[in-house]
Image (cartoon, grey):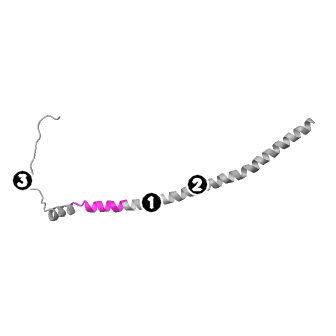
Amino acid sequence: MRGIARLKIKEAFKIIGISLITLSIPVILGLYAFQAKKYSDLTKEVIELEAKQEKLIEENKKLVGEISILSNAERIEKIATEELGMHKAESDDIIRVEMTGEKK
């Protein structure tokens, strides 16, 4: 009797083990599919961000070029003299101010 009971317990554990393995396979496959989808989405996002970064780098290069053109000393002097009626200061035009006294 004891042998039969042990046999039934062993068989029950065997059935439970096989059932758990059988049920875990779809769960593992579902998790794998979820991770694959997540990886795919992240890969797509990385590609989009890299394209955006490349666009921003090109725009930045363009803006740096425009800054160098606009800040050219000859251009600024030309605008100052021709459009604003300015002229270079002569030595007589320069006034030096000296501050004396205590700092507060």
Q: Quadrant of residue 77?
A: bottom left
Q: Amino acid at mark 2?
A: Lys
Mark 1 crowdedness (10 Å alpha carbons): few <14, some 14-19, many ≥20: few
* Quarter of the figure with the N terminus: top right
Name the mark nearer the viewer: 2 or 3: 2
Q: Earlier in the sequence, mark 2 or mark 1?
A: 2
Q: Secondary structure at mark 1?
A: helix
Q: Earlier in the sequence, mark 1 or mark 3?
A: 1
Q: Earlier in the sequence, mark 2 or mark 3?
A: 2
Confirm whether the magenta stretch covers residue 52: no
- x, y percent for residue 44: 53, 59
Which stretch did the figure color magenta?
60-73
- Taking 61 as reference, is 27 left or right? right
Confirm whether the magenta stretch covers residue 61: yes
**Residue 101 higher or lower than 59, as above or below:** above
What residue is drawn where x is 85% and y is 41%? Answer: 10
Q: Real-space Cα distance between discs 1 and 3? A: 55 Å
Mark 2 crowdedness (10 Å alpha carbons): few <14, some 14-19, many ≥20: few
* Quarter of the figure with the C terminus: top left
- x, y percent for residue 87: 12, 60
Is the C-beta separation of discs 1 and 3 under 8 Å? no
